[in-house]
Amino acid sequence: RIEAAAGLAAYEAACRDRQLVNELARRFSVSAEEVPGRVEALEEQVRSLQKTLREQETAAALGQVDALLGRAVDVQGVRLLAADVGAQSPEVLKSLADALLARLGSGVVVLGGVGDGKAQFLAAVSADLVKRGVHAGKLVKEVAKVAGGGGGGQPGFARAGGKDPARVGPAVRQAATILAETLGSADR
């Protein structure tokens, strides 16, 4: 859509634009010509700070790996680590799940947390258990139902969401029951 102004309206629009540029120049302590460069520099600084924050969040989450591994349980001969890890970004949840599954070797990891005011879940299953019929997508879908949600994904890795963040803990606690049912039906 193209809009045009002529005469007095065009002059007033140009004056408003110039006033805006001058205000930005004053706030940034630069000349009007330097405003675009200053905005670009600030954008780069924000990207850099966001990256640093993500790295620190990931490092903090990975610092929990040993403590979380101690919470793994045996479900019909399969090691299951199901935990509510609190407020985490989806990227941090993925990094944490990858690290936990790598340390478990053979096993299932189900993590729950809260992000953007919603419940979020992730399931990861080692390759040997995928061959036995354990499916991360089906598992995480059932877990998420407890929190009023759904989702799914691949046999080895899947994500889901839920509407009720207060139900993350109970949902994650259901992982053992859901896994036992899955293993029971896979063995038949």
Image (cartoon, rainbow, N blue to C red):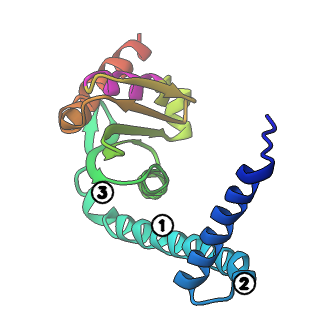
Q: Is residue 96 left or right of residue 29?
A: left
Disc 2 target residue: 34
Based on the picture, tell me whether residue 135 belongs to the magenta stretch.
no
How far apart marks 2 and 1 lie (CA) works out to 31 Å
Main secondary-structure element of the magenta-colored stretch: helix
Disc 1 target residue: 54
Which of the two residues, 140 or 99, is positioned nearer the viewer here? Answer: 140
Which of the two residues, 174 or 94, is positioned nearer the viewer here? Answer: 94
Q: Earlier in the sequence, mark 2 or mark 1?
A: 2
Count residues near mark 1 (Cα–Cα under 10 Å), then give few for <14, some for 14-19, many for 20+.
some
Q: Amino acid at mark 3?
A: Leu
Q: Position of residue 139 (x, y in %)?
A: 40, 26
* Dot label at residue 69: 3
Looking at the rendering, which quadrant does residue 150 occupy?
A: top left
Q: In which quadrant is the C terminus drawn? A: top left
Secondary structure under the numbered disc 1 in the rendered image: helix
Q: Nearer the viewer, mark 3 or mark 2?
A: 2
Count residues near mark 3 (Cα–Cα under 10 Å), then give few for <14, some for 14-19, many for 20+.
some
How far apart marks 3 and 2 lie (CA) works out to 53 Å
Q: Position of residue 60 (x, y in %)?
A: 35, 70
Q: Amino acid at mark 1?
A: Arg
Q: Is residue 24 left or right of residue 134?
A: right
How far apart marks 1 and 3 lie (CA) works out to 23 Å
Secondary structure under the numbered disc 3 in the rendered image: helix
- Stretch of the chain drawn in magenta: 138-146
